[in-house]
Image (tube, helix red, strand yellow):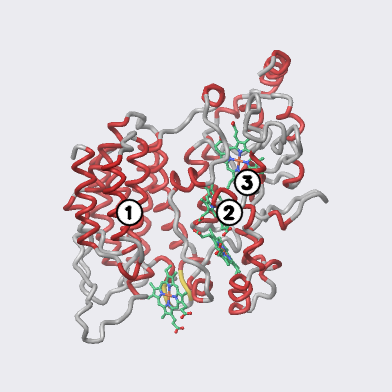
Amino acid sequence: MSRVFIVLALTFASLTAPAAAQAPFGDHPVPLNDGLTHMGVASCSTAGCHGDQVSGVGAGPVVGQNEYFQWASRGEKGAHSRAYEVLLTPHGKRIAANLGVGRAEAAPECLSCHADAAPNKTARFQISDGVGCEACHGGAQEWLAFHRIGAGHEANIEAGLYPTEDPAARARLCMGCHLGSSFENQFVNHRIMGAGHPRLKFELDLYTTIQQHHVVDDDYRTRKTVAPGAQVWAVGQAMGLERTLELLLDNDTGSAGAFPELVFFDCHACHQPISEGDGQLSWRPNPGRALGPGAPILNDANLIMLQAAMRVVDPAIAERLDSEGRVLHAASQHSGDHFHNAARTLKGTANEAVARILGSDLSSPSAARAMLVQVTDAKFAKRYTNYAAAEQALFAVQRLTAAMNADNAAMRAAIEKASRAAQSPYAYNQNAFTAALADIGAMAGG
Ligand code: HEC
Ligand code: HEC
Ligand code: HEC
Ligand code: HEC
C-alpha cells in the first residue's frame, strides 16, 4: 500500500468506523437482499481495477487485480461466469421446457441462482454476466469509488461490501444457490430435478478453493482474518444441516402437496437399479438410524459429518446430534407434527454447533487431524451406506488432509483409492471405501 493510500485509509476509517461495524458478520444481508444498487461486472473489470492487463498474473500492490480474468476463465474457476450461459444450452432449454416456465434465461425460477437477481441495477448491469462479482461481493454503488482509494476493509463492509472472508457469512452466501434459501425461487425442488436439473452438492471449503481468485499473502493477512480450513469445513456442515432443516420446515419449500418434498431425501436410495434376481442387492443396515429396508431415507450426509466434527469440538453436542438424528429419521416415516418437532429440535442443536465451531480455535493441524480420525473411523464409516454420505466423507478427507499439511504420495494414493470406491453413485462400494478410509486414518495417526 502506498503512503497516500494509508493516509486516506485512516481518514476514512476514523470517519466511518461506528459501533455498528462490531455487529457479527453473520447478520450482514446477503447480496441478493442487500438493498444496494448492483452495477455490473463491467464496473469492476477495467484495466487498473480487477481486470488489470499489466498485472494480469496477479501482481497488484494490494489485491491481485486479475480477479476478472480468473472469474471469466473457461476452466473450473470460471464456472460462475458461465452460470447464465448454461441456461442457453440444450440441457438448460430442456429443463425449462419440461417445467413449462418459458425461456430459461428469462425465468425467475432459474435466474435466482444462475445470475445476480438483486432487484436494483444500473443500466450498465448485464444479466448475461451470470453470477457476477456483486452477486457475492454485494452491490457496489456505495463503495465502488470509495474502496478504490483504499478506504479499508471495515469501511468497505460498512458501505455494503459483503464479508466473504467470514466463514459463516460465506456459507450463507454460497448455500443460497448451492443448497437453497427461502428467498423466492431460490430453491431446486424434486420437480425441477425431475425435469433434468443436476443434483446439488456442496462443501464450503472445497468449493471455496475451486473458485478461488484471490491470493493469500502477508498483505492479505494484515487486512483480513483467514479462517482455518477445519473451521470452514465444520461450519459449512453445521450451517448446511441448519439450512436444510429450515427449508424442510418452511411451508413453501417443505412439502409438495400431500407428500414431503423429496429433495430432502437421499436421491440414490430411490434412484437405484432394482435387483432382478442377479444378487446385486444394495441395502445395508445403518447404525445411525433404526430404519429397515425399503424406507425413504433423509439425506443425512451433513448430519454425519457434523457429528464427526463435534466429537472433537464438543462431544456433548455430538451425542445430542446422534440421538436427535435418530428421532428425526424415525419421524421422517410419518408426516405431521412429530416430524416437524424433531426437525425443529435438531435445527436448534445445529445452530448451537455453529456457535461452538466459530468460537473454537481450530487453527492447529492437530484439530484437523482429530476430525479426520473421526471421519475415517471404521465404526463411524458404517454410516456411509448412502452415496451422498460417502461423497461428503471424501470431500472431508481432501480438505482436512490439506488443513493438516498431510500431502504426501502415500496419502494421495489412499485418497485416490477412496475416490475410486465412491466414483459413481451407481457403483459405490462401501467395503472398499471403508478400507481406503481406514488406511487414511492410520496414516493420519488414528
Ligand atoms: C437454488 C439455485 C438454483 C436454481 C433455482 C436453479 N439452478 Fe441450475 N444449477 C444450480 C447450481 C448450484 C448448479 C451447479 C451444480 C454443481 O455443479 O454442483 C446448477 C447447474 C445447472 C445446469 C448444469 C450446468 C452444467 O454446467 O452442466 C443447468 C443446465 C441448470 N442448472 C439449469 C437450470 C434451469 C433451467 C433452472 C430453472 C428451471 C435452474 N437451473 C434453477 C443452482 C440452481
Ligand atoms: C461466487 C462468489 C464470488 C464471485 C462471483 C466473485 N467473488 Fe471475489 N471473492 C469471493 C470469495 C469467497 C473471496 C475470498 C474471501 C475474501 O477475501 O473476501 C473473494 C476474494 C476476492 C478478492 C480478494 C480480496 C482481497 O482482500 O485480497 C477480490 C479482489 C475479488 N474477490 C474480486 C472479485 C471480482 C472483481 C469478481 C468479479 C469479476 C469476483 N470477485 C467475483 C467470492 C466471489
Ligand atoms: C447467485 C448464485 C450463486 C452463488 C451466490 C454462488 N454460486 Fe457457485 N455456482 C452457481 C451456479 C449456478 C453454478 C453452476 C454454473 C455452471 O454450471 O457453469 C455454480 C458453480 C460453482 C462451482 C463449480 C462447481 C462445479 O461442479 O464445477 C463452484 C466451485 C462454486 N460454484 C462455488 C461457490 C462458492 C464457494 C460460493 C460462495 C462463495 C458460491 N459458489 C456462490 C451459483 C452460485
Ligand atoms: C422417495 C423416492 C425419491 C427420492 C428420494 C428422489 N426421487 Fe427422483 N424420482 C422419484 C420418482 C417417483 C420419480 C418419477 C419417475 C417418473 O416420472 O417416471 C423421480 C424422477 C426423477 C428424475 C427424472 C427421471 C427421468 O427419467 O427423467 C430425476 C432426474 C430425479 N428424480 C432426480 C432426483 C434427485 C436429484 C433426487 C435427490 C435430490 C431425487 N430424485 C430424489 C423418486 C424419488
Looking at the rendered structure, the kind of residue marked 3 is Trp
Q: Do the residues labelled 1 and 3 touch (CB within 8 Å)?
A: no
The image quarter in which residue 403 lies: top left
Q: Residue at x 33, y 38 (%)?
A: 407
Left of 134 or right of it: where is 267?
A: left
Quadrant showing the N terminus: top right
The image quarter in which residue 345 lies: bottom left
Query: Which residue corresponds to mark 1?
Result: 303
Q: Does label 1 point to a residue whose CB lies under 8 Å from ligand 4?
A: no
Between disc 1 and disc 2, the foreground one is 2
Q: What element carries label 2?
A: helix
Q: Which of 419 and 93 is in front in this view?
A: 419
Residue 21 appears in view: yes
Q: In this view, does 96 lie above or below 247?
A: below
Q: Which of 409 and 197 is in front in this view?
A: 409
Return the mark for residue 79: 2
Residue 254 x, y percent position in the rendering: 46, 66
Q: Which of 330 and 273 is in front in this view?
A: 273
Residue 143 appears in view: no
Query: Which residue corresponds to mark 3?
Result: 71
Residue 397 x, y percent position in the rendering: 32, 46
**Residue at far left of view:** 379
Between disc 1 and disc 3, the foreground one is 3
Left of 317 or right of it: where is 137?
A: right
Give the Cα separation between the discs numbered 1 and 3.
Answer: 32 Å
**Residue at far front of view:** 409
Q: Is mark 3 on a helix, strand or loop?
A: helix
Q: Does label 3 point to a residue whose CB lies under 8 Å from ligand 2?
A: yes
Give the Cα separation between the discs numbered 2 and 3.
Answer: 8 Å
Looking at the rendered structure, the kind of residue marked 1 is Leu
Q: In this view, does 236 lie above or below 369?
A: below
Q: Earlier in the sequence, mark 2 or mark 3?
A: 3
